[in-house]
Image (cartoon, helix red, strand yellow):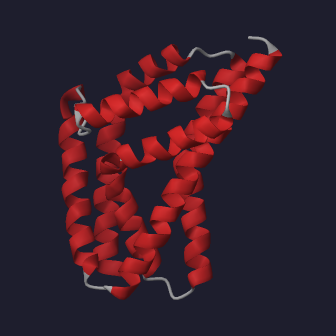
Amino acid sequence: MALSGRRKVLAIGLAFTLGVYATYFALGLGLIKVFAYVPLIKYVIVALGLFFGSMSILSGWGGEFKSPVPRKFKSLAETAIEKASKAVNPLTATGAGVLVSLTLLPCSSGPYLVATAALAALKSRTLALAMLALYNAIFVAPLIAIMIGVATLAIKARKLKVWRTKKLATMEVVSGVLLILISLYALFAI
């Protein structure tokens, strides 16, 4: 992979990741405000967290993962990712990051709703914003790791996708268990 190719991967990857981060951060700010003004919504969020966590465990159980994302949204997200990977313009990649974030929101909303409900309960708004920034940084960390791997180690994206597909069922069960634990924490500790 030529140096210019690596720079392109990094520029496009960073722009895409920035789009994802900015979208989720903006959504998080809105959710924190909603939860702060409607405290009883916590119980709805906990119920959703328990539901989504259970669904994640069930979808990953037995080693076969079935995506909850409707095919239309999945196709739209894959098209956006494909365009971003071919784009020379980082602005296009940022837009693709925003679009992918919005279309995949049904998959990632369970943990995000529980986390933002917990952040809304914090007394310090500064701490809530800092924790939201940290949550989103952790959320996009795998994107950054993949981008760095592809750019510096010349890892082929196809190999990463095959590896992820093999591990997806296990990751789904683990994420479901974690979501249930976080939901129970939110129910009893917040």
Q: Nearer the viewer, residue 7 or 79?
A: 79
Vertical arrangement, residue 38 with respect to residue 19, above or below: below
**Residue 83 on image: x %, y %:** 52, 26
Q: Quadrant of the C terminus?
A: bottom left
Q: Is residue 173 left or right of residue 20?
A: left
Vertical arrangement, residue 112 with respect to residue 41, above or below: above
**Residue 142 on image: x %, y %:** 55, 39
Q: Is residue 155 visible?
A: yes
- Which of the 4 quarters of the picture holds residue 150? top right
Q: Is residue 103 left or right of residue 93?
A: left
Marks counted in the figure total 0
The residue furthest top is: 1
Q: Is residue 163 left or right of residue 185?
A: right
**Residue 187 on image: x %, y %:** 28, 76
Q: Nearer the viewer, residue 12 or 68?
A: 12
Residue at 34% across / 55% down in the picture? 109
Residue at 59% across / 36% down in the picture? 92
Vertical arrangement, residue 174 with respect to residue 51, above or below: above
